[in-house]
Image (cartoon, grey):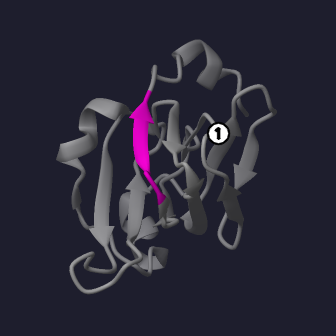
């Protein structure tokens, strides 16, 4: 799913706007389409789209209790990896539950656009910690 126009036909939640506020934590371009308004809903959901080869930095969703993140893959193909574990191939329909306090990253495969709905799981004393980028050497080993 390398062609942006073909991808747009299957990306049912839409591309959204360039993810400029978090661009420093991504290699490549990503886009954000909020699906809920945090002012009117206690649960924030957003469709996050990654261009081919785009991935976010290693990061941790900290929480004293509860917290974490859920990814629902909706279009294209991507990767998810927890620190110290093998990467998981993502495709539409894959659901990833990320417990709080687990270092991980996610993003598109080299040859595919990719979208997932990101759900921030409510919890106590939640905060995100952005860590180092996923190196080209690490990423290029994925196939």
104 over 7 or under it: above or below: above
Percent x, y of residue 27: 38, 30
Question: Please, which residue is most extreme toward the top here?
Answer: 137
Please identify the quadrant where the N terminus is shown. bottom right
Residue under label 1, please give it. Answer: 102
- Is 43 positioned to the left or the right of 20 in the image? right
Q: Which of 2 and 75 is in front in this view?
A: 75
Identify the residue at horizontal 65%, vertical 69% (top origin): 92
In front of the other: 47 or 102: 102
- The answer to whether residue 17 is above or below residue 141 is below
| Number of numbered labels in the structure image | 1
91 left or right, relative to 68? right
Q: Classify the position of the C terminus by image quarter.
A: top right
Residue found at x 42% / y 34%: 129
Q: Counting other residues with Cα less than 10 Å from the Cα at mark 1, is it few (<14), some (14-19), or many (20 or more)?
A: some
Q: Is residue 7 left or right of residue 36?
A: right
Q: Residue most toward the right?
A: 86
- Give the magenta-colored segment's residue range: 124-130
Asked whether 79 or 6 is in front, the reply is: 79
């Amino acid at each position: 799913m390398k062609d942006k126009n073909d991808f747009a036909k299957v990306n049912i939640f839409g591309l959204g706007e360039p993810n400029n506020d978090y661009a420093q934590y991504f290699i490549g371009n990503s886009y954000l389409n909020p699906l809920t308004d945090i002012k009117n809903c206690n649960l924030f959901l957003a469709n996050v789209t990654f261009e081919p080869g785009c991935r976010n930095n290693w990061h941790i969703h900290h929480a004293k209790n509860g917290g974490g993140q859920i990814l629902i893959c909706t279009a294209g193909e991507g990767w998810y990896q927890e620190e110290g574990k093998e990467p998981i191939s993502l495709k539409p329909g894959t659901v990833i539950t990320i417990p709080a306090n687990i270092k991980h990253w996610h993003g598109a495969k080299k040859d595919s656009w990719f979208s997932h709905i990101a759900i921030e799981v409510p919890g106590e004393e939640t905060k995100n910690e952005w860590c180092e980028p996923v190196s080209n050497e690490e990423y290029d080993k994925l196939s």
